[in-house]
Image (cartoon, helix red, strand yellow):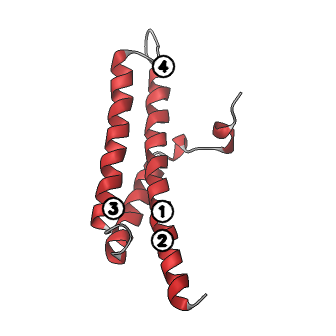
């Protein structure tokens, strides 16, 4: 593998990692909302209002994914992509207490 191929693969990996991080950000927002629902009076995870709120989070994720691809030119604009990295990292850090764990991925 030559240096250009290595550089391109690393850039592609960094781009896809940011897509993954945006999905994780949405997951943390959903877990945050579920935690709030659990403490609400008359607690229900599946009320029409809660379902709509979670739906909005998915719409927000979709919009964010599209914006990231547009601004980074699908990973071809490295400067734009570099601006997204600290932004996504900060947003993830704000919701650190709701991060995924290996236990989250285990089905009963």
Q: Nearer the viewer, mark 4 or mark 1?
A: 1
Q: Disc 1 marks which residue?
A: 16
The image quarter in which residue 29 lies: top left
What's the CA distance linking mark 4 and mark 2?
A: 41 Å
Q: Disc 4 marks which residue?
A: 39
Q: Nearer the viewer, mark 4 or mark 2?
A: 2
4 and 2 marks in contact (CB < 8 Å): no
Q: Answer above or below: position of 10 versus 71.
A: below
Q: Earlier in the sequence, mark 4 or mark 1?
A: 1
Res. 61 mark? none
What's the CA distance linking mark 4 and mark 1?
A: 35 Å
What's the CA distance linking mark 2 and mark 1?
A: 6 Å
- Which residue is more in the foreground, 20 or 28? 20
What's the CA distance linking mark 2 and mark 3?
A: 12 Å
On the rendered structure, is 84 left or right of 31? left
2 and 1 marks in contact (CB < 8 Å): yes
> Which secondary structure, mark 1?
helix
Image spot of residue 54 (x, y percent): 39, 30
What's the CA distance linking mark 3 and mark 1?
A: 10 Å
> Which secondary structure, mark 4?
helix
Q: Disc 2 marks which residue?
A: 12
Q: Answer above or below: position of 60 versus 31.
A: below
> Which secondary structure, mark 3?
helix
Q: Nearer the viewer, mark 4 or mark 3?
A: 3
């Amino acid at each position: 593998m030559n240096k250009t191929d290595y550089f391109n693969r690393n850039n592609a990996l960094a781009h896809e990692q940011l897509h993954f991080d945006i999905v994780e950000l949405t997951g943390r927002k959903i877990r945050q909302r579920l935690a709030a629902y659990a403490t609400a009076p008359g607690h229900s995870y599946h009320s029409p209002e809660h379902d709509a709120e979670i739906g909005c989070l998915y719409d927000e994720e979709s919009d964010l994914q599209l914006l990231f691809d547009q601004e980074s030119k699908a990973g071809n604009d490295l400067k734009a992509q570099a601006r997204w990295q600290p932004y996504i990292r900060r947003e993830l850090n704000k919701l650190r207490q709701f991060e995924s764990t290996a236990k989250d991925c285990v089905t009963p």
